[in-house]
Amino acid sequence: MARRTKVVGIAGRFGPRYGSTLRKRWRDVMKRRYDVYVCPFCGAKTRMKRISIGVWQCPKCGRVFAGGAYQPITEIGSTGIIKSA
């Protein structure tokens, strides 16, 4: 059976609905959410579990920490420096 979702990947389940741009944006967000990340505490490479928006848990060590809405480690959070306006 031929694969018909080569470009949009996981968003292929929506079929022709909602427009190609929105499907591709949704695909990118979901890819970041379900990617494998390195735990900042134990160093294990695993898929973090999202408990709620911005709250993540490492399945190996069980530590709960704050992160982004769709990814556990964000660009701003990795620098450690937050600039105020």
Image (tube, rainbow, N blue to C red):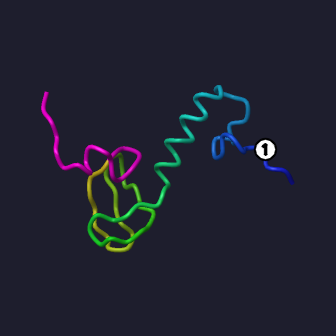
Q: Quadrant of the N terminus?
A: bottom right
Dominant secondary structure, magenta: loop
Q: Is residue 85 above or below residue 6?
A: above
Provide residue 5's location: percent of width, then percent of height: 73, 44
Provide residue 58's location: percent of width, then percent of height: 35, 66
Image quarter of residue 44: bottom left
Q: Secondary structure at mark 1?
A: loop
Q: How many marks?
A: 1
Q: Quadrant of the C terminus?
A: top left
14 with respect to 36 (left or right): right
13 with respect to 43 (left or right): right
Residue located beneath label 1 in the image: 4
Provide residue 70's location: percent of width, then percent of height: 41, 45
Residue density around tag 1, few if under 14, some if 14–19, many if 20 or more, within 10 Å = few
The region drawn magenta spans: 68-85
In the rendered structure, does residue 70 fall within the stretch colored magenta? yes
14 with respect to 52 (left or right): right
Q: Is residue 1 above or below residue 16?
A: below
Residue at 39% of width from left, 49% of height from top?
Answer: 71
In the rendered structure, does residue 33 fall within the stretch colored magenta? no
Residue at 52% of width from left, 46% of height from top?
Answer: 30
Image quarter of residue 43: bottom left
Provide residue 14's location: percent of width, then percent of height: 68, 37
User: In the rendered structure, which amino acid carries the disc numbered 1?
Assistant: Arg
Residue at 33% of width from left, 52% of height from top?
Answer: 73
For this orientation, the residue located farthest to the left is 84
